[in-house]
Image: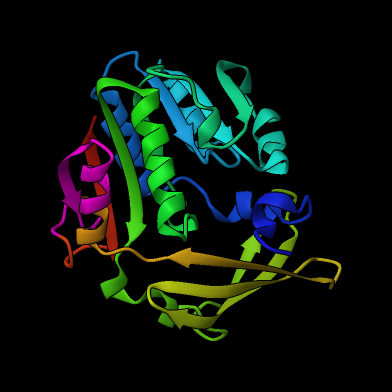
Amino acid sequence: MRDGEFLDPLLVPVYDAECRWGPDDDFFLAVVNETPAARVLDLGCGTGRLALALAAAGHSVTGVDPAGPSLAAARRKPGADRVTWVQAASPALPDRAYDVAVMTSHVTQVFVADDEWERTLADLARALRPGGRLAFDSRDPADRAWERWNPVDSRRVIGLPDGRRVRAWTEFTEVRDGVVDFTHHYVLPDGAERLSSATLRFRSEAELRDSLRAAGFTVERVHGGWHGQAVGEGDGELVVVARR
């Protein structure tokens, strides 16, 4: 299955257990908190980890995601009633409705084709009020993260809340012009194996800056990691904050 972590009811809890709160969440929470009581859009909110924390911090949060099983998991979590959950993609966003928009966990990379990415940025520009901010992360292609997506370096054990364990590993299958195909392998507690394939686009800092400028954004800063490091000196990330 493609994108099984978000669409397969058996894999959504595995993804949720593996992807816990981290320094990336601290960064995005701090960015949003710079605007008190903000109207926040979390586009590609997944199972809601950050959206719930933003709501608990006093913001008015809308979590938007096209994956129904991920949103179902988000709605079951404590505090979920504080968030407006919407199963949709960016064309459904209302005009000038938000002060801040975030796209986290490398959501930006699922927009592989340039026209798809440009449409998403146009939708975000339309959905933000004038002066509103957009923050997102994307892996820096110079870090070549996909080279570590192999059965040896990516092998891991994921602990589920009920104490059971899932064995997992990743392997990339093709790299071409900034586009990477890969497959996650999961061995569930009952021994069954589930596969989840995906394709991601790795855009350079220059490409991100150019696309944001074309969509009407001004780039305020780009970091290479979650603690404000320069590009190329941090966590292999391109962490972007821009203003509409």
Q: Is residue 221 magenta?
A: yes
| Residue extending farthest bottom | 152
Tell me which residue sits at (52%, 77%) in the image: 154
Q: Residue at x 47, y 60 (%)?
A: 112
Is 37 left, or right, of 192 in this rendering? left
Instruction: Report the residue at 28% width, 40% height from top.
Output: 215
Position of 17 with respect to 138 (left or right) is right
Q: Is residue 127 above or below residue 43?
A: above
Residue 135 rendering spot, x and y as whole percentages: 31, 39
Q: Is residue 135 left or right of residue 50?
A: left
Highlighted magenta segment, given as a residue range = 210-230
Q: How many marks?
A: 0
Q: Image quadrant for the N terminus?
A: bottom right
Residue 226 at what x, y percent from top left? Answer: 26, 51
| Magenta residue check for 5 | no
Q: Is residue 61 visible?
A: yes
Residue 125 higher or lower than 231, as above or below: above
For the C terminus, the image quarter is: top left
| Viewer-side residue, 31 vs 208 | 208
When asked about the image quadrant of residue 157, the answer is: bottom right
**Colour scheme employed for the rendering of this structure:** rainbow
- Quadrant of the image occupied by residue 128: top left
Residue 164 percent across, percent down from the top left:
75, 59
The answer to whether any part of residue 106 appears in the image is no
At a point 30% along the width and 41% down the height, the residue shown is 27
Query: Picture coordinates of residue 191 (x, y %)?
Result: 84, 73
Query: Is residue 86 or residue 129 the one in the foreground?
Result: 129
